[in-house]
Image (cartoon, rainbow, N blue to C red):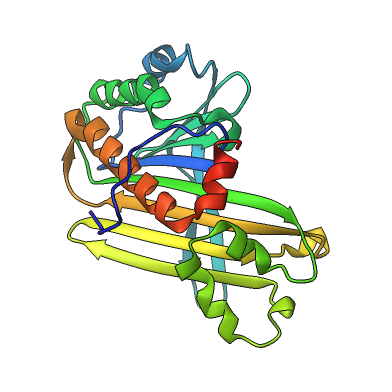
Amino acid sequence: MFGFKTVVHKEYKNNFLRTVVFQLLFDKNDLLKNKSKEIQELFKNNFPRFNTSKGQGFQISFNNENTNFQPIEEGHIINLKSEDGQKSIEINETTLSFTITGKAYKCFNNLTDDLNNIVSFLKLCSIQNVNRLALRKINIVEFKNNDNPTDVLSLLLNPDLVCQLNAYPNKSHINHCLQALNYKDGNNFLNIKYGLIIPPQFNEEIGQLVIDIDLFKQELIEIDNIINHSTAINSEIFNIFSWLINDNTEKMLNNE
Protein backbone atom coordinates (compact mmCIF):
# COMPACT_ATOMS: atom_id res chain seq x y z
CA MET A 1 0.00 0.00 0.00
CA PHE A 2 2.75 2.47 0.98
CA GLY A 3 5.88 0.46 0.20
CA PHE A 4 6.76 -0.77 3.68
CA LYS A 5 8.22 -4.26 3.79
CA THR A 6 5.57 -6.93 4.24
CA VAL A 7 6.18 -9.05 7.33
CA VAL A 8 4.43 -12.10 8.70
CA HIS A 9 1.72 -10.92 11.08
CA LYS A 10 2.07 -12.31 14.59
CA GLU A 11 0.70 -11.75 18.06
CA TYR A 12 3.27 -10.48 20.55
CA LYS A 13 3.23 -11.53 24.20
CA ASN A 14 3.33 -7.85 25.21
CA ASN A 15 2.34 -4.62 23.56
CA PHE A 16 2.87 -0.91 24.07
CA LEU A 17 -0.57 0.06 22.84
CA ARG A 18 -2.26 2.85 24.74
CA THR A 19 -5.24 3.34 22.41
CA VAL A 20 -6.74 1.71 19.31
CA VAL A 21 -9.47 3.58 17.40
CA PHE A 22 -11.58 2.14 14.57
CA GLN A 23 -13.77 4.75 12.88
CA LEU A 24 -16.39 4.87 10.14
CA LEU A 25 -17.93 7.95 8.50
CA PHE A 26 -21.18 7.75 6.57
CA ASP A 27 -23.87 10.02 5.17
CA LYS A 28 -26.17 11.59 7.75
CA ASN A 29 -28.62 9.03 9.11
CA ASP A 30 -31.72 9.92 11.09
CA LEU A 31 -32.64 6.44 12.31
CA LEU A 32 -30.52 6.33 15.49
CA LYS A 33 -33.23 7.51 17.84
CA ASN A 34 -35.90 5.19 16.45
CA LYS A 35 -33.51 2.22 16.42
CA SER A 36 -31.96 2.79 19.88
CA LYS A 37 -33.54 -0.26 21.52
CA GLU A 38 -32.54 -2.53 18.65
CA ILE A 39 -28.99 -1.14 18.69
CA GLN A 40 -28.77 -1.76 22.45
CA GLU A 41 -29.92 -5.35 21.92
CA LEU A 42 -27.40 -5.88 19.11
CA PHE A 43 -24.39 -4.86 21.21
CA LYS A 44 -25.57 -5.93 24.69
CA ASN A 45 -23.27 -8.97 25.10
CA ASN A 46 -19.99 -7.09 24.72
CA PHE A 47 -21.24 -3.57 25.52
CA PRO A 48 -23.86 -3.84 28.29
CA ARG A 49 -23.45 -0.24 29.45
CA PHE A 50 -25.74 1.82 27.22
CA ASN A 51 -26.92 5.41 27.23
CA THR A 52 -28.18 8.02 24.80
CA SER A 53 -27.85 11.79 24.71
CA LYS A 54 -28.32 14.83 22.52
CA GLY A 55 -25.42 16.40 20.69
CA GLN A 56 -24.54 19.90 21.85
CA GLY A 57 -23.72 22.83 19.61
CA PHE A 58 -24.03 26.59 19.33
CA GLN A 59 -25.99 28.85 17.04
CA ILE A 60 -24.48 32.27 16.46
CA SER A 61 -26.63 35.32 15.84
CA PHE A 62 -25.51 38.86 15.14
CA ASN A 63 -27.12 42.23 15.67
CA ASN A 64 -25.83 45.77 15.60
CA GLU A 65 -24.47 45.64 19.13
CA ASN A 66 -23.87 42.04 20.22
CA THR A 67 -22.93 38.58 19.09
CA ASN A 68 -25.08 35.93 20.77
CA PHE A 69 -24.21 32.27 21.24
CA GLN A 70 -27.32 30.17 21.69
CA PRO A 71 -26.83 26.51 22.77
CA ILE A 72 -28.76 24.07 20.61
CA GLU A 73 -29.24 20.29 20.53
CA GLU A 74 -27.79 18.55 17.51
CA GLY A 75 -28.95 15.05 16.72
CA HIS A 76 -28.86 11.81 18.68
CA ILE A 77 -25.80 10.17 20.24
CA ILE A 78 -25.48 6.57 21.44
CA ASN A 79 -22.71 5.51 23.84
CA LEU A 80 -21.92 1.87 24.56
CA LYS A 81 -19.26 0.51 26.91
CA SER A 82 -17.98 -2.88 27.95
CA GLU A 83 -18.51 -3.88 31.56
CA ASP A 84 -14.95 -2.85 32.51
CA GLY A 85 -15.05 0.33 30.40
CA GLN A 86 -11.99 -0.74 28.39
CA LYS A 87 -13.92 -0.80 25.11
CA SER A 88 -16.43 1.80 23.95
CA ILE A 89 -18.49 2.69 20.90
CA GLU A 90 -19.89 6.15 20.21
CA ILE A 91 -22.36 6.63 17.39
CA ASN A 92 -23.83 9.85 16.06
CA GLU A 93 -25.70 10.63 12.85
CA THR A 94 -22.55 10.54 10.67
CA THR A 95 -19.85 8.69 12.62
CA LEU A 96 -19.12 5.48 14.50
CA SER A 97 -16.00 5.39 16.69
CA PHE A 98 -14.88 2.16 18.36
CA THR A 99 -12.14 2.74 20.95
CA ILE A 100 -10.12 0.09 22.80
CA THR A 101 -7.54 0.72 25.51
CA GLY A 102 -4.24 -1.07 25.11
CA LYS A 103 -4.85 -3.51 27.95
CA ALA A 104 -8.03 -4.79 26.32
CA TYR A 105 -6.45 -5.19 22.88
CA LYS A 106 -4.78 -8.53 22.15
CA CYS A 107 -4.92 -8.79 18.37
CA PHE A 108 -7.11 -7.57 15.54
CA ASN A 109 -8.63 -11.03 14.99
CA ASN A 110 -10.17 -10.82 18.46
CA LEU A 111 -12.36 -7.95 17.25
CA THR A 112 -14.20 -10.05 14.67
CA ASP A 113 -17.43 -10.28 16.69
CA ASP A 114 -17.44 -6.55 17.39
CA LEU A 115 -16.80 -5.67 13.75
CA ASN A 116 -19.53 -8.04 12.60
CA ASN A 117 -21.93 -6.34 15.02
CA ILE A 118 -20.90 -2.95 13.66
CA VAL A 119 -21.73 -4.14 10.12
CA SER A 120 -25.07 -5.41 11.46
CA PHE A 121 -25.70 -1.98 12.97
CA LEU A 122 -25.11 -0.34 9.60
CA LYS A 123 -27.57 -2.71 7.97
CA LEU A 124 -30.09 -2.06 10.74
CA CYS A 125 -29.93 1.67 9.98
CA SER A 126 -30.10 1.10 6.22
CA ILE A 127 -26.55 2.40 5.70
CA GLN A 128 -25.25 0.71 2.55
CA ASN A 129 -21.89 2.46 2.19
CA VAL A 130 -19.35 4.31 4.30
CA ASN A 131 -17.27 7.23 3.05
CA ARG A 132 -14.23 6.80 5.27
CA LEU A 133 -12.70 3.88 7.14
CA ALA A 134 -9.88 4.53 9.59
CA LEU A 135 -7.72 2.62 12.05
CA ARG A 136 -5.35 4.33 14.45
CA LYS A 137 -2.93 2.73 16.91
CA ILE A 138 -1.08 4.79 19.51
CA ASN A 139 1.88 3.09 21.21
CA ILE A 140 3.56 4.68 24.23
CA VAL A 141 6.60 3.38 26.10
CA GLU A 142 7.29 5.13 29.40
CA PHE A 143 10.85 5.16 30.70
CA LYS A 144 12.76 6.67 33.59
CA ASN A 145 14.55 9.73 32.29
CA ASN A 146 18.34 9.84 32.55
CA ASP A 147 21.07 12.24 31.58
CA ASN A 148 20.47 11.60 27.88
CA PRO A 149 16.81 10.78 27.12
CA THR A 150 17.52 10.40 23.38
CA ASP A 151 19.23 7.10 24.27
CA VAL A 152 15.83 5.44 24.40
CA LEU A 153 15.27 6.25 20.71
CA SER A 154 18.44 4.40 19.78
CA LEU A 155 17.45 1.56 22.08
CA LEU A 156 13.98 1.01 20.60
CA LEU A 157 13.68 2.52 17.10
CA ASN A 158 15.00 1.63 13.66
CA PRO A 159 18.60 2.97 13.52
CA ASP A 160 17.87 4.74 10.23
CA LEU A 161 15.35 6.95 12.05
CA VAL A 162 17.63 8.12 14.85
CA CYS A 163 21.02 8.50 13.15
CA GLN A 164 20.20 12.15 12.36
CA LEU A 165 20.20 12.95 16.08
CA ASN A 166 23.97 12.51 16.11
CA ALA A 167 24.22 15.74 14.10
CA TYR A 168 22.71 17.82 16.91
CA PRO A 169 24.92 19.34 19.63
CA ASN A 170 24.09 18.75 23.31
CA LYS A 171 21.84 15.77 22.67
CA SER A 172 21.37 15.34 26.40
CA HIS A 173 19.39 18.59 26.48
CA ILE A 174 16.80 17.37 23.96
CA ASN A 175 13.53 16.53 25.69
CA HIS A 176 11.09 16.68 22.78
CA CYS A 177 11.80 15.13 19.40
CA LEU A 178 8.62 14.19 17.56
CA GLN A 179 8.67 13.48 13.83
CA ALA A 180 5.50 13.60 11.68
CA LEU A 181 4.98 12.23 8.18
CA ASN A 182 2.00 12.10 5.85
CA TYR A 183 1.56 9.71 2.93
CA LYS A 184 -1.08 9.65 0.20
CA ASP A 185 -1.61 6.80 -2.24
CA GLY A 186 -4.79 7.34 -4.22
CA ASN A 187 -7.61 7.21 -1.69
CA ASN A 188 -5.37 5.82 1.06
CA PHE A 189 -3.86 8.20 3.61
CA LEU A 190 -1.27 7.55 6.29
CA ASN A 191 -0.11 9.71 9.21
CA ILE A 192 2.90 8.60 11.27
CA LYS A 193 4.21 10.31 14.38
CA TYR A 194 7.12 8.94 16.35
CA GLY A 195 9.69 10.21 18.79
CA LEU A 196 10.46 11.39 22.28
CA ILE A 197 8.33 13.41 24.68
CA ILE A 198 9.03 14.46 28.27
CA PRO A 199 5.54 15.45 29.47
CA PRO A 200 5.73 18.51 31.75
CA GLN A 201 3.41 16.96 34.33
CA PHE A 202 6.05 14.28 34.98
CA ASN A 203 8.60 16.94 36.06
CA GLU A 204 11.08 15.50 33.58
CA GLU A 205 11.45 12.30 35.64
CA ILE A 206 9.54 10.13 33.19
CA GLY A 207 9.86 10.17 29.42
CA GLN A 208 7.68 8.68 26.70
CA LEU A 209 8.50 7.12 23.38
CA VAL A 210 5.48 7.60 21.09
CA ILE A 211 4.62 5.63 17.94
CA ASP A 212 1.31 6.83 16.49
CA ILE A 213 0.09 5.27 13.22
CA ASP A 214 -3.16 6.48 11.65
CA LEU A 215 -4.22 4.93 8.35
CA PHE A 216 -7.50 5.63 6.59
CA LYS A 217 -9.24 4.95 3.31
CA GLN A 218 -11.40 7.80 1.99
CA GLU A 219 -13.69 6.38 -0.64
CA LEU A 220 -17.12 4.81 -1.01
CA ILE A 221 -16.96 1.35 0.61
CA GLU A 222 -19.83 -1.11 0.60
CA ILE A 223 -20.53 -2.34 4.12
CA ASP A 224 -19.97 -6.01 3.19
CA ASN A 225 -16.36 -5.07 2.32
CA ILE A 226 -15.60 -3.24 5.59
CA ILE A 227 -13.99 -6.18 7.39
CA ASN A 228 -11.75 -7.07 4.42
CA HIS A 229 -10.59 -3.46 4.09
CA SER A 230 -10.07 -3.20 7.85
CA THR A 231 -7.95 -6.36 7.87
CA ALA A 232 -5.79 -5.02 5.04
CA ILE A 233 -5.32 -1.70 6.85
CA ASN A 234 -4.39 -3.47 10.07
CA SER A 235 -1.81 -5.59 8.22
CA GLU A 236 -0.26 -2.46 6.72
CA ILE A 237 -0.09 -0.83 10.16
CA PHE A 238 1.73 -3.91 11.44
CA ASN A 239 4.20 -3.63 8.55
CA ILE A 240 4.82 0.03 9.41
CA PHE A 241 5.22 -0.66 13.14
CA SER A 242 7.65 -3.51 12.41
CA TRP A 243 9.72 -1.17 10.25
CA LEU A 244 9.77 1.58 12.89
CA ILE A 245 11.10 -0.60 15.73
CA ASN A 246 14.41 -2.45 16.05
CA ASP A 247 15.42 -5.91 17.24
CA ASN A 248 15.61 -4.83 20.91
CA THR A 249 11.99 -3.73 20.87
CA GLU A 250 10.85 -6.94 19.21
CA LYS A 251 12.56 -8.95 21.95
CA MET A 252 10.78 -6.86 24.58
CA LEU A 253 7.45 -7.47 22.87
CA ASN A 254 8.17 -11.20 22.86
CA ASN A 255 9.24 -11.02 26.52
CA GLU A 256 12.69 -12.38 25.72
> Is residue 94 among the parts visible in the rendering?
no
* Nearer to me, 192 or 44: 192
- Tell me which residue sits at (51%, 19%) in the image: 47
- Tell me which residue sits at (43%, 47%) in the image: 136
- Tell me which residue sits at (59%, 65%) in the image: 154
Instruction: Name the quadrant of the C terminus.
Output: top right
Horizontal side of 197 relative to 224 (left or right) equals right
* Nearer to me, 14 or 178: 14
Quarter of image, res 86? top right
Count of numbered labels shown in the rendering: 0
Residue 209 lies, in percent from the top left, at 62, 58
Residue 182 lies, in percent from the top left, at 36, 66
Q: Is residue 155 above or below residue 161?
A: above
> Is residue 92 among the parts visible in the rendering?
yes
Q: Is residue 76 above or below residue 121?
A: below
- Tell me which residue sits at (57%, 51%) in the image: 248
Q: Is residue 75 above or below residue 149?
A: above
Horizontal side of 141 relative to 100 (left or right) equals right
Q: Is residue 50 above or below residue 183?
A: above
Quarter of image, res 123? top left
Residue 80 lies, in percent from the top left, at 51, 25
* Nearer to me, 24 or 16: 16
Residue 20 lies, in percent from the top left, at 48, 40
Horizontal side of 73 relative to 118 (left or right) equals right
